[in-house]
């Protein structure tokens, strides 16, 4: 059964949801339309790319992923179909494809369309054509490259890692850009502190589960994406520490005998 996912800036009650779903239903009867993520802050392609990068592979191969985030076409930022890893991505060449894939696509096509068509019509028609069996090359001209945006990565100095929060989930857990591989490269078999925002907020060990520490205590764990996640057992750390994407996470050498940090 054909699957189309939507990742958008729209509120659940926004009229654009009904428009694109109506167009897709009319153009591809029987299509399964899935709201992958909505309500993303307008133009926040870093958050949208994080969500799509970590969700698309859970859908069946051959799925079409429509991206309506900062999606108006501009000069040299065209509407594209990008085929990669047996999935199709439809959106605008604003850097998001590079952030999603972090690798070379199999195919990049600039979508040919009537200049009077709006992007919802363009995206729905392209998805319909792909699901009907057309090749992306039938829908436009090939493009050699996509726009590149360099993803924000953790930096390493001597016995120090400086990273950033890149995503806050529904529970207020703060996901950083510090990977397990980077952490182990610097701190395997060493004592360390993981500091959040300031020297006053820290933990000195990695947990496996949220319940590994007492209620109201800060914890750090590697999540299913192998990224370091900062949390509080039983509370919203993003609210308590005013964390948001861009907030700093620092790991440095420390005395393992240091007391754990409790907020209240």
Image (tube, rainbow, N blue to C red):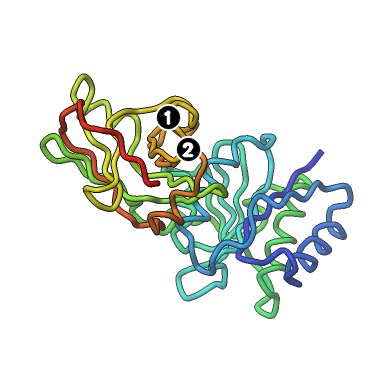
Secondary structure under the numbered disc 2 in the rendered image: loop
Q: CA distance from mark 1 to mark 2?
A: 7 Å
Whole-percent x, y for residue 117 in the image = 70, 75
Residue reaching furthest bottom?
116
Residue appearing at x 58%, y 41% in the figure = 55
Residue reaching furthest top?
189
Mark 1 nearby-residue class (10 Å; few <14, some 14–19, many ≥20): some
**On the rendered structure, is 158 left or right of 168?**
left
Between residues 52 and 41, which one lies in front from this camera angle? 41
Residue reaching furthest front?
264
**On the rendered structure, is 203 left or right of 169?**
left
Whole-percent x, y for residue 43 in the image = 50, 68
Residue appearing at x 64%, y 58% in the figure = 38
Asked if disc 1 and disc 2 are in contact, CB closer than 8 Å, the reply is: yes
Residue appearing at x 74%, y 49% in the figure = 34
Label annotation for residue 213:
1
Label 1 or label 2, whichever comes before in sequence order: 1
Q: Which residue is mark 2?
A: 233
Whole-percent x, y for residue 200 in the image = 25, 48
Residue appearing at x 31%, y 28% in the figure = 205
**On the rendered structure, is 213 left or right of 53?**
left
């Amino acid at each position: 059964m054909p699957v189309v996912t939507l990742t958008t800036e729209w509120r659940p009650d926004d009229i654009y949801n009904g428009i694109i779903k109506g167009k897709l239903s009319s153009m591809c009867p029987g299509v399964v339309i899935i709201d992958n993520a909505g309500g993303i802050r307008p133009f926040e392609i870093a958050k949208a790319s994080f969500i799509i990068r970590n969700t698309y592979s859970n859908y069946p191969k051959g799925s079409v992923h429509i991206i309506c985030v900062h999606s108006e076409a501009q000069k040299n930022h065209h509407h594209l179909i990008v085929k990669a890893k047996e999935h199709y991505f439809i959106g605008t060449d604003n850097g998001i494809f590079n952030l999603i894939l972090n690798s070379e696509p199999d195919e990049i096509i600039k979508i040919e369309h009537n200049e009077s068509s709006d992007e919802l019509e363009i995206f729905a028609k392209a998805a319909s054509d792909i699901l009907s069996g057309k090749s992306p090359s039938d829908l436009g001209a090939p493009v050699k490259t996509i726009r590149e945006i360099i993803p924000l990565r953790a930096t390493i100095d001597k016995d120090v890692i400086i990273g950033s929060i890149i995503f806050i989930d529904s529970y207020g857990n703060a996901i950083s850009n510090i990977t397990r591989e980077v952490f182990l490269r610097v701190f395997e078999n060493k004592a360390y502190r993981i500091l959040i925002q300031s020297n006053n907020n820290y933990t000195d060990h990695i947990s496996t589960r949220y319940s590994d520490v007492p209620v109201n205590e800060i914890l750090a764990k590697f999540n299913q994406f192998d990224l370091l996640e900062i949390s509080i057992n039983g509370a919203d750390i993003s609210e308590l520490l005013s964390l948001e994407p861009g907030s700093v996470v620092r790991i440095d050498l420390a005395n393992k005998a240091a007391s754990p940090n409790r907020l209240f």
